[in-house]
Amino acid sequence: MLGSSLFAQAIPLLSLPILTRLFPAESFGVLALLLSVAAALAVLSTLRFDLAMVLPDLEEEAVDIAGLTCLTTIVVALLTIIIGVGGLEVLQPSSVGISSAVGLSLVVAMTILIAVQQVSIAFATRRKNFPGIAATGVISHSTNLFVAVVSGLFSPTLTALAEARAFGQLAASGNLVRQERTAWSQISLQRSALRARELLKRYRPFILFNAPYSLVGSLMRDIPLYTLLTLHSASTAGLYGIARTVTFAPALLGSAAFSQVFFRYALENRASLEFSAQIKRWLRLGLVASAPAFAIAAAWGEEIFSLVFGQAWAESGSMAASLAIAAWWSLQTSWPERIFEVQGKQVVSFTIQSVGDLITAFGFILLVWSDARLTTSIALLALGQSLTYQIYTAYVARLSGLNRSAVVALAIQGWACFGFFYVVYKVAGEALESSEWAMALSCVVAVAGAVLLLKLETRFASRRS
């Protein structure tokens, strides 16, 4: 599963140097906007009941939850069309240069496809069909890349990237629905409708905590995007979107590859004596082993983006350098975040994320509104996000049974590794006249450092055991 997830995440990242030369930054801004709206609507559609589907022992209960999710998705899709036709600007994004009808159609289609895919993933998780889940990403990104490249070569419209993403989602959802067709065939919308009140009451925590957390997190995360679209341009939003996509890709991988697996592991082992020790080891491993890579992004972001994506994307690289620390801490929260559900502490998770995101977003909007330098605004945004993720990581560790001193020690070890490699990269840049040679040396140091830290951590864990 990990290999397939790595390959799936590698496809969009490796394809970016091609796509950034086929499409202008405005196209990426339009893609980010439509995906953001669709993701928010998908949360309203599913109410995150897809997460609840893995809990019941009886398959019939899970199928009825899936049926209820289908009903809510239909309602949200119809309301979106009605409101969009009525003129809500966010669903008719003509201000960014695309047709209102096309924008609305893409938003509705992607919303439905996201919901179908999430329900299918829940069915697959119940059957422990993790290879099928991992293959979904490969199919989605491969189809997306093929359609995008063809469109870029022959008809590079502003919505071409969004259309390619929709085709990718369609292919991936269709494949997973085919694999889980037995479960899908058991869904009865009528039975789910009759049991709606019972199911809503039984799985109310997912409505009260998981859904608001996902919705607020999605909207707050994309406030910089909306702000840049409104106060700057679709091009600036596209530059920011690429910077965020690249730097936060490891966190998305961690969530996709390990979140569901960790949830099952935590449910089965949270009472064991080894649970907290294992979580401590995994957290330390994630902090120190990933520090070299994120430090190189912080030190050489602008130069790396200019080299890989083209000189036109240098500003995006500067944004990526500012976001590197926040992305590094986001990786640490990506896989163990569902410990809050296991321990029944969703309200804590929701409070940390929503308050942190709200304060950070408010500060970012004020800076952009006051015509502050964009680099300053992005730096403040990254600072607020990194603080939020650090607090979140600390609570994850505490809920896993670690004491305060152990949590502080983990943070110190992580920051020490990050700071050491950042200084090494900067010294290399000062010592070598050629930035290309300095970046090459930094990459070698990053790989060697990560391998060494992995070996040291493995040896340390062996001695402790």
Image (cartoon, rainbow, N blue to C red):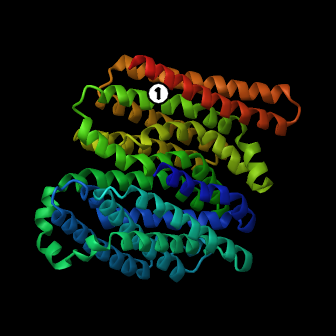
Tell me if I can see residue 296 in this picture: yes
For the image, the number of numbered tags is: 1
Tell me if I can see residue 373 in this picture: no
Q: Position of residue 132 (x, y in %)?
A: 42, 61
The structure residue drawn at horizontal position 58% and vertical position 50%, both measured from the top left corner, is 244
Question: Helix or strand or loop: what does disc 1 sit on?
Answer: helix
Q: Which residue is mark 1?
A: 284
Of 366 and 183, the residue lying toward us = 183
Q: Position of residue 334 (x, y in %)?
A: 43, 43
The structure residue drawn at horizontal position 37% and vertical position 70%, both measured from the top left corner, is 179
Of 140 and 402, the residue lying toward us = 140
Image quadrant assignment for residue 239: bottom right
Image quadrant assignment for residue 144: bottom right
Q: Position of residue 212 (x, y in %)?
A: 31, 54
Position of 268 with respect to 19 (left or right) is left
- Which residue is farthest right? 433
The structure residue drawn at horizontal position 67% and vertical position 59%, both measured from the top left corner, is 16
Position of 410 with respect to 71 (left or right) is right
Q: Position of residue 223 (x, y in %)?
A: 49, 54
Of 178 and 255, the residue lying toward us = 178
Position of 68 with respect to 223 (left or right) is left
Which class describes the residues within 10 Å of circle 1: few (<14), some (14-19), or many (20+)?
many
Amino acid type shown at disc 1: Arg
Residue 110, placed above or below residue 100: above
